[in-house]
Amino acid sequence: MDQFASILSHLSLQNIVEIATIIGAIGPLLTQGNGVKNDTRVIIRYVSNDFDVTSEQLNNSGCVFRAFLYIAIMVCSVGLVISLLHAPFAQALFPPPSSTQQAQTLVQTFFDDINNKDYQSAYYLTKDGFSRSYDEFADGYSLTEYNEISFEKVEKLADNTVRVVIVIKATEKLLIGTGSVTSYYRSTYITGLDHGRYVILRGTAVKISKP
């Protein structure tokens, strides 16, 4: 059950819609028609031979059995479709994101967390905060009000890491007094695996004039 729930949690909205569409198409086809109805009546009559069952009860039983059969078909259809979605050929139908897409999403998420002051989540997306404690990492953004980023280059490297180059438009509080100032930085990040986690491994930033 836990494995089934885990699989369901990884399905996108598109996958769920497709599953529902397939079930909607298959279910009625498999449960309609006199053939299935007559077969269910035969099964019920055979099972009820040793019991005092009226015709009305038999008809009601047929409806109940047919409803149960329909539900069983739906459940089996869900299992079948989920299995197909996770089969090897499913990668051709639903290809996983490329390494460059994954890297770009990671960097975007990192700055979204910074802008939301969720420094703990942002720290978790890096390799040990680039060798800083969490407190040191969070203090580094104490003057940051908002970061607007634009991607300049995202490229896969020979060692399977990805280099992400961005320009940051940073709105920062003044160190003395009130108000804020806008600064621009060109930052380069390297993303990759660290103990099984996909994180920002390291990064550098250079202050630049307005691009």
Image: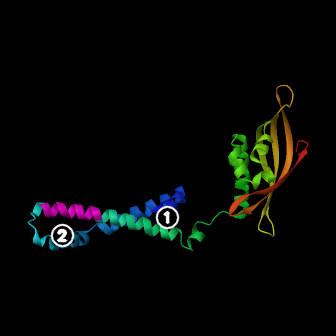
Residue 58 or residue 29, whichever sits in front: 58
Q: Residues within 10 Å of mark 2 (few under 14, many from 20)?
A: some
Question: Which badge, 2 or 1, comes first in the chain's sequence?
Answer: 1
**Left or right: 51 as drawn, with respect to 15:** left
Residue type highlighted by circle 1: Gln
Residue behind mark 1: 3
Q: Which residues are magenta?
A: 57-68
Residue type highlighted by circle 2: Ile
- CB within 8 Å, label 2 to label 1: no
Q: Which x, y percent locates residue 128?
A: 76, 54
Residue behind mark 2: 44
**Left or right: 76 as drawn, with respect to 194:** left
Is-magenta flag for residue 67?
yes
Residue in the picture at 91% in, 42% down: 209
Q: Which of the 4 quarters of the picture holds residue 177?
A: top right
**Left or right: 15 as drawn, with respect to 62:** right
Q: Which x, y percent locates residue 120?
A: 69, 46
